[in-house]
Image (cartoon, helix red, strand yellow):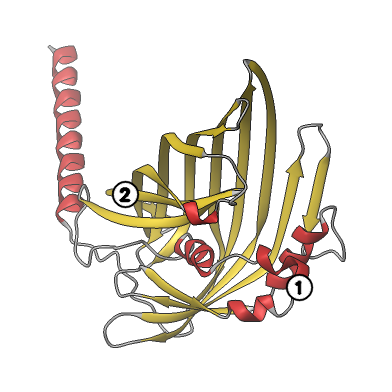
């Protein structure tokens, strides 16, 4: 009887613990959260950024195949500061690239590095571009729902780079993409609960010269959970997107034979950790994979190229004030 009583007590305790956990989870899911920026003027953070881009290309000419690989890695630090918060919830911020490095591992195994903190690099045009972007305060316009709408100050970068390299300066849309991946959530709901979803459409530049265009993504976000990190409530946001390639045919040189570019597969997965006390992102992890087929119909033969690319990115807040 005594043994049986112990089992009964243990079972009862387990049931009560399960009931308590269920109640806590239910209460958390029922709680309303605002995932939009609710910043204070002067609020600032510094982010550490890292990106790895791996490419595997296979070219087929007259039935003969040849494959090659390429890997690029970049890392650096970016400062973010809230300058002005407007009555409608929108804001103006300053994004400053403090330093960036870019490493390229060539198919022959040679590693070429470029670091904005050094006086020279292995690829002069890239190094020139990196140095020109550093320390330039870019003014970023952020809508009330966290969507980055505009970036000003790019002309200051162009004025610091040699005429021969000016076409390498990123476009405004590229800087909007960089800002989007820092502090905010895109199209964030003003009031939501754990388990809820929302959509956000984004479009970023794409290039594989001589071809250029845009990669569109219909991101589906899920507010997955709220966790405690050293006493700070952190919202966990998971995102998935299918990608669509829109080729800009006006960018194709006139002397190039007829060409087709097709996105065979394109997917993006991301997870964002969002500080609910400061209403800014703590960190992000993302993986994007694409498979693109290029077909060029030359007069005497057809050239086919398949490019498989994997881009992994990480953003981590390393300081705040």
Position of residue 277 relative to residue 230, above or below, is below
Q: Please name which of the two marks, 2 or 1, marks the residue nearer to the observer.
A: 1
Residue at 75% across / 69% down in the picture? 131
- Front-lying residue, 178 or 302: 302
Q: Which mark is residue 163?
A: 1
Mark 2: give few (<14), some (14-19) or many (20+) Cα within 10 Å.
some
Q: Which mark is residue 89?
A: none
- The quadrant the N terminus occupies is top left
Q: Secondary structure at mark 1?
A: helix
Disc 2 to disc 1, C-alpha distance: 37 Å
Position of residue 294 relative to residue 209, above or below, is above
Where residue 186 appears, as percent x and y from the top left, is: 34, 61
**How many numbered marks, from 0 up?**
2
**Residue 88, quarter of the rendered image:** bottom left
Q: Is residue 68 left or right of residue 219?
A: right
- To which residue does mark 2 refer? 218
Residue 278 visible? The answer is no
Mark 1: give few (<14), some (14-19) or many (20+) Cα within 10 Å.
few
Q: Is residue 278 left or right of residue 145?
A: right
């Amino acid at each position: 009887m005594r043994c049986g009583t112990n089992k009964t007590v243990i079972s009862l305790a387990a049931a009560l613990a399960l009931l308590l956990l269920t109640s806590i989870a239910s209460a958390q899911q029922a709680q309303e959260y605002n995932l939009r920026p609710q910043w204070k003027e002067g609020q600032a953070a510094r982010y550490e950024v890292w990106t790895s881009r791996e490419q595997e290309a296979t070219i087929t000419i007259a039935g003969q195949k040849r494959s090659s690989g390429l890997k690029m890695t970049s890392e650096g630090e970016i400062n973010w500061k809230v300058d002005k918060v407007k009555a409608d919830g929108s804001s103006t911020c300053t994004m400053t690239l403090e330093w960036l490095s870019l490493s390229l591992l060539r198919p022959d195994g040679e590693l070429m590095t470029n670091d904005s903190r050094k006086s020279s690099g292995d690829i002069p045009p890239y190094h020139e571009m990196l140095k020109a972007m550093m320390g330039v305060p870019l003014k970023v316009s952020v809508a009330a729902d966290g969507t980055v709408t505009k970036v000003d100050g790019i002309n200051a970068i162009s004025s610091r780079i040699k005429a021969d390299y000016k076409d390498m300066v990123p476009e405004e849309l590229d800087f909007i993409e960089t800002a989007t991946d820092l502090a905010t959530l895109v199209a964030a709901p003003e009031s939501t609960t754990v388990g809820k979803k929302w959509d956000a459409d984004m479009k970023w530049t794409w290039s594989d010269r001589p071809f250029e265009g845009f990669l569109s993504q219909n991101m589906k976000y899920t507010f997955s959970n709220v966790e405690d990190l050293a006493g700070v409530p952190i919202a966990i946001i998971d995102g998935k997107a299918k990608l669509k390639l829109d080729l800009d045919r006006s960018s194709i040189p006139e002397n190039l034979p007829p060409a087709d570019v097709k996105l065979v597969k394109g997917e993006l997965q991301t997870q964002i950790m969002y500080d609910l006390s400061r209403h800014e992102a703590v960190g992000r992890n993302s993986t994007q994979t694409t498979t693109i087929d290029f077909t060029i119909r030359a007069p005497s033969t057809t050239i086919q190229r398949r490019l498989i690319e994997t881009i992994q990115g990480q953003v981590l807040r390393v300081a705040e004030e």
